[in-house]
Image: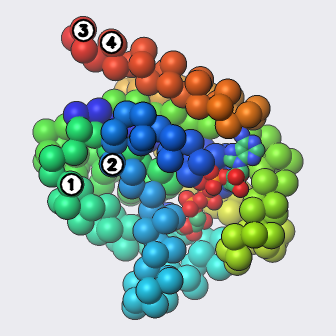
Amino acid sequence: MFNLILFGPPGSGKGTQSEKLVEKYELIHLSTGNLLREEIANRTPLGLEAKNFMDKGQLVPDEVVIAMIDSCLEHHKQAVGFLFDGFPRTAAQAQALDKLLALKKTEIGLVLALEVSEEELVKRLLNRGKTSGRSDDTNEAVIHQRFIVYNNETAPIAEHYKKLKRFQAIKGEGSVDEIFNYLCQAIDKRMKTLASQ
Ligand code: B4P
């Protein structure tokens, strides 16, 4: 099993690249952002709770997202691997993920972190907001709040994966295909190393 985390600030291209990566490597795509937006669209109690946080640029409580991931892992017992997109976003989520994967006798194989300047991120998110109707993409104050939360709560968990030597930064600016190529090169190299162990 090969499990990959796509890491990076809001708007860095995690969702965009994940779609291409899951197709190429036949991984199951687990995007907590997409799962939460589905709950909101279906007007479930979980979705209504999550919307309050997402609209303000805050993270949805850990227990909610961890339960969602747990249930998705259970639903895909035969998967050749998972691509975690936008998860984990806090230290508690990273710890929970390690535990859930250990129960399945697997672990994270690689964390790829997309690096994009804040100026470019704001541009991309405001641009997406024009067509997506996503309330968290249309207000610049909310976008900045998301960066603050990312820097305080999400960025520090990179250290955990750096210590395990599973972390690699990838240039996230350029064309979608260029970035996809950088990601594939890193994945192929890691898969080769794992296969030879
Ligand atoms: P997410 O849905 O995870 O999304 P994101 O961080 O906003 O964007 P992503 O990096 O996927 O960017 P994308 O490819 O779409 O999170 C939304 C919210 O959900 C969070 O703020 C939080 O409230 C909640 N949430 C999610 N997971 C959570 C968790 N684990 N715990 C708690 N709360 C959680 O790209 C953005 C734009 O850039 C697109 O328009 C795209 O077309 C464009 N783009 C992509 N690549 C480009 C390129 N190379 N050049 C130019 N434009 C590009």
Describe residue 11's horizontal placement relative to residue 126 as left or right. left
Q: Is residue 150 positioned above or below 120 on the image?
A: below
Q: Which residue is mark 4?
A: 193
Ligand 1 occupies quarter:
bottom right
Label 2 – label 4 distance at C-alpha? 22 Å
Q: Which residue is mark 1?
A: 76
Q: Earlier in the sequence, mark 2 or mark 3?
A: 2
Q: Earlier in the sequence, mark 3 or mark 1?
A: 1
| Crowd tier of the residue under label 3, counting other residues whose Cα lies within 10 Å: few below 14, some 14–19, many 20 or above | few
Residue furthest to the top: 196
Q: Which part of the image, by quadrant, shows the N terminus?
A: top left
Evaluate if marks 4 and 3 touch, with contact meaning CB atoms under 8 Å apart: yes
Q: Which residue is mark 2?
A: 28
Evaluate if marks 2 and 1 touch, with contact meaning CB atoms under 8 Å apart: yes
In the image shown, does 146 or 1 lie closer to the viewer?
Answer: 1
Label 2 – label 1 distance at C-alpha? 8 Å
**4 vs 1, front mark:** 1
Residue 191 placement (x, y as % from top left): 34, 20
Describe residue 84's horizontal placement relative to residue 153 as left or right. left
Residue drawn at (65%, 31%), measured in percent from left and top? 177
Residue drawn at (78%, 54%), measured in percent from left and top? 124
Q: Earlier in the sequence, mark 4 or mark 1?
A: 1
Report the number of numbered marks.
4
**2 vs 3, front mark:** 2
